[in-house]
Structures are given as C-alpha cells and as structure tokens.
C-alpha cells in the first residue's frame, strides 16, 4: 500500500473511532429515553404500576360507592326538595298557571304540588340501586379503559348513556305509584281546578309521571357525578383500601 493510501486509511479509522466514542458518551449521559417517552405519554392505565384487573375493580367499586351514596342522599326526606340544584320544579308548560294561581290566592296549592313531586321522587329513588349495581357488574375492560382515561365524570356519563332507558322504564311506574301515595295527582288536580275556575282561564294537560321521572333521574345522575368527582379528587372520599390504591396520587 502506498504512503498516501495508508494515511487515508488511518484518517478514516480515526474518524470512525471518534464517532463511536461520541455515540457511547451521548448514550451514557442521557436519561432513560424510553422511560422518559412513556412518562411523557401520561397513560393513566400504567399509573402506580396497577394491573388492569385492579383498575377495573377500582372503577367498579367507585361507582358502587358513588351510586350508593347518591341514592341514599336523594332518598332521604327532603333529598330532592331542599337541594336547590336537583329540586323538581313546576313543569314549564304550567308554570304560568302556577304563577297566576298563586296571585289569585292559591299559593298553598302550588306549594303542595311542588312538594309532592319531590316527595314522589324521594320515595322512588331507592329502587334505582339494584339497576345501578347490575350495570356496574356488566362493565367491560374496554368500558373501564375509556372511563379511566376520561373526564372526572366519565363513569357517570357512561353509566347514564348505558342505563337511562332501562332506569326510566323501571322508575316511571314507581314514580307514578309514589305520586298517588303522596298525593301529587290530587295536589295537581286541586291546583288546576282552582286555576280553571278563574274566568277565561284554561290549561294544557301534562304527563306528570314523565316529568317527575325525568327530573328525578337527572337529579340522581347529577349526584352520582358529584360523588365520582369527589372520589377522583378528594382523598377523604376514598373510603376503602382499593379506592385509595387506584385513585391515590
């Protein structure tokens, strides 16, 4: 080999050696690149090294606890009536009727009607618990995964989407019977009778069962959502070891 070719070969060898040295130096000085990448993804399902079964169990327990507390809350005396957020108000179609009836001295009948609607919902609410439990048991892993990665009320929204029709069908006849028991229908007829006795006044009929059922379920789901938020964000609301493990920071 000529002196010139030998010199070129040495230069190439030296350059390659330098590149290899720099490459090893860069790798040794860097943090774990795969670990940093995974952390950057912020995938909730790998938080704390929890396995899928634990996460699903935790979510189901959260829903069980949350729905249980919500049902207990709204089922209590004044559970709906004194909670201004979920209180069942006069149907819009007859709000003007109620306002006019009150002005003509029938405020007592109006108040009794509103109270009786809320009493009917309070009386019917406990029946929802079994349907909640059944729906929770049927939750799949894919459902749980979406909920785990969703918003702070993702479980409640899923639950509402999946069970609203079934709950409505089960809830309505109970509400209807409860309204008869607590005198809602009587109070409504009395209020409307007073109103229609006023000259030139007529009123549109409404489906009271539908109104109270819808509003009752809306209020119940709202309370379930509040319980879910609390479990996700408030350590004191995690009343079991599993909840602390799954939802703890």
Image: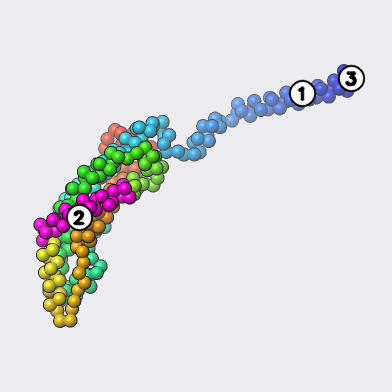
Identify the secondary structure beneath mark 1: helix
User: In terms of secondary structure, what is the magenta stretch mainly?
Assistant: helix
Q: Residues within 10 Å of mark 3 (few under 14, many from 20)?
A: few
- Residue 167 highlighted magenta (yes or no): yes
Q: Is residue 16 visible?
A: yes
Q: Going 39% across and 47% down the picture, which residue do you hit? A: 151
Taking the view exactly as shown, the residue that stands out farthest to the bottom is: 199
- Residue 88 highlighted magenta (yes or no): no
Residue 214, image quadrant: bottom left
Q: Position of residue 121 (x, y in %)?
A: 18, 55
Nearer the camera: disc 1 or disc 2 = 2
Q: Quadrant of the C terminus?
A: top left
Q: Going 76% across and 23% down the picture, which residue do you hit? A: 14
Identify the secondary structure beneath mark 3: loop
Q: Position of residue 233 (x, y in %)?
A: 34, 43
Q: Position of residue 172 (x, y in %)?
A: 20, 55
User: Range of the magenta residues?
Assistant: 159-183
The residue tagged 2 is: 172
Left or right of 114: which side holds 58?
right
Earlier-in-chain disc, 3 versus 2: 3
Residue 101 drawn above or below residue 67: below
Residue 15, image quadrant: top right
Q: Going 85% across and 20% down the picture, which residue do you hit? A: 6
Nearer the camera: disc 3 or disc 2 = 2
The residue tagged 1 is: 14
Nearer the camera: disc 3 or disc 1 = 3
Residue 108 drawn above or below residue 219: below
The residue tagged 3 is: 2
Identify the secondary structure beneath mark 2: helix
Q: Is residue 99 visible?
A: no
Earlier-in-chain disc, 1 versus 2: 1
């Amino acid at each position: 080999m000529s002196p010139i070719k030998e010199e070129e070969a040495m230069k190439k060898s030296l350059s390659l050696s330098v590149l290899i040295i720099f490459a090893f130096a860069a790798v040794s000085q860097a943090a774990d690149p795969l670990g940093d990448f995974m952390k950057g993804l912020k995938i909730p399902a790998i938080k704390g090294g929890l396995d899928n079964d634990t996460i699903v169990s935790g979510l189901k327990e959260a829903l069980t606890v949350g729905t249980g507390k919500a049902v207990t809350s709204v089922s209590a005396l004044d559970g709906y009536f004194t909670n201004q957020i979920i209180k069942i108000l006069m149907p819009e179609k007859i709000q003007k009727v109620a306002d006019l009836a009150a002005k003509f001295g029938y405020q007592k009948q109006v108040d009794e009607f509103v109270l009786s609607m809320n009493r009917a919902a309070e009386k019917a609410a406990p029946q929802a618990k079994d349907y909640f439990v059944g729906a929770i048991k049927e939750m799949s892993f894919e459902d749980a995964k979406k909920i785990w990665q969703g918003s702070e009320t993702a479980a409640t929204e899923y639950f509402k989407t999946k069970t609203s029709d079934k709950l409505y069908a089960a809830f309505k006849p109970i509400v209807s019977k409860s309204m008869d028991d607590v005198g809602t229908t009587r109070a409504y007829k009395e209020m409307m009778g007073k109103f229609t006795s006023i000259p030139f006044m007529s009123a549109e009929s409404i489906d009271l069962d539908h109104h109270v059922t819808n509003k009752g379920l809306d209020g119940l789901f709202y309370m379930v959502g509040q319980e879910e938020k609390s479990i996700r964000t408030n350590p004191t609301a995690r009343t079991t070891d599993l909840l602390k493990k799954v939802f703890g920071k």
